[in-house]
Amino acid sequence: MYAGAIARHEYWRLVAYGFLHVNFVHLTMNMLCLVLWGAHLERRVGPAYFLIIYLCAMVLGAVIGNGIHSTPYLTVGASGATSGILGALLCLWILGKLEVGFDFFAINIGLNIAFAFGNSRIDWGVHLGGFAAGLIICALLDLAEKANVWVLRCKFPEPVKVNLTLLGCVVALWAWSGPGQAMAASGSGWIPAFVAVVASCAVVKAIDVALSVRRGLAIAVAILACMNAAAVTLSGWVLASSCTPRWPTGAVPLDNLLAAFCPNPVLISGLAAIGAAALTLWLCSKEISRGIEDVGFVGASLRAERNRRHGL
């Protein structure tokens, strides 16, 4: 991430910078924070919400840090995302949903502040932005979970929730980078976003209804496998539209990818779609087995869990 990234529409840097580090010590420190803080958060909110908090803190940390900087800069590292984990833990503690003492936050936040002031190379803007983003996103997820009691019947199992989260990211990218850019030029850029939101809500409700019926968990996994295959196929079609009759190989990884993909886009897209569906079924094999053996208790337990748990 650098000063001119957003102005040049290099939005991938808002995520990519979080996976690049200066050296082994930098990587080790961030991964140590990920283990020590992330374990608490993932056990409390589950993998899907952990993924949302981590990525949002990474992106918003970069955006806020970019706004704070008044001079050219370069930033790499997962510090914004890990700071977001700490902010989310603080949010849960404020809500009374985390059983740790105040000394946990006093020590960890104090160490972060000390490192920021003791090392001029540390980007405190990204740390602060990620921390604030994690706190805010966690609070919003808690409100969403409370609102879901009135909207959804069932508490979604974590594999279903993770899959829906990833599909939501794909839909957002499609609405933003595909039709969104084309319609933005004509002043109708809100249409793809509106369609994406409506379609996402409809899918979530359909999964909710499926989970509430007998053997619904197996049905929901089958629906997700089909949707994953469709998402991969559509991505292949979008990628195929970038092909030229003779796409040259080059230094850019995307060039090499297209050079291998363009000769047989339909075949490769089809095989990738079958692989995505098979991978979904394999990863959710326990849920499929549980759903097939269901005699009417799974849906009832998921509905009871939704009514019993308010918020995160």
Image (tube, rainbow, N blue to C red):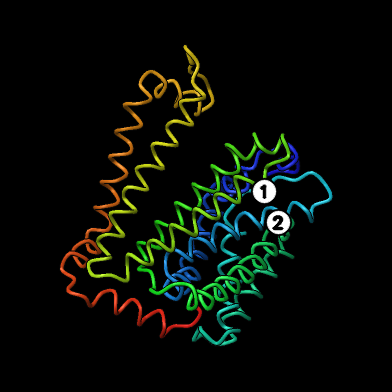
Judge whether 222 appears above or below 34 on screen: above
Image side of residue 124 versus residue 103, left or right: right
Q: Position of residue 274 (x, y in %)?
A: 28, 39
Location of residue 212 (image quadrant): bottom left
User: From mark 2 to mark 1, how far is it between C-alphas?
Assistant: 7 Å
Location of residue 275 (image quadrant): top left
> Amino acid type of disc 1?
Thr
Mark 2 and mark 1 in contact? Answer it, CB < 8 Å: yes
Which residue sits at x=59%, y=85%?
103
Q: Position of residue 253 (x, y in %)?
A: 50, 28
Disc number at residue 75?
A: 1
Q: Position of residue 5 (x, y in %)?
A: 70, 40
Q: Position of residue 70 (x, y in %)?
A: 84, 50
Q: Residue furthest top?
A: 246
What residue did someone put label 2 on?
123
Which residue sits at x=29%, y=74%?
299
**Marked residue nearer the N-terminal end (2 or 1):** 1
Image quarter in which the N terminus is found:
top right
Question: Dot 2 surroundings within 10 Å: few (below 14), some, or many (20 or more)?
Answer: some
Which residue sits at x=74%, y=51%?
66
Helix, strand or loop at disc 2?
loop
Image side of residue 171 versus residue 84, left or right: left
Helix, strand or loop at disc 1?
loop
Question: Dot 1 surroundings within 10 Å: few (below 14), some, or many (20 or more)?
Answer: many
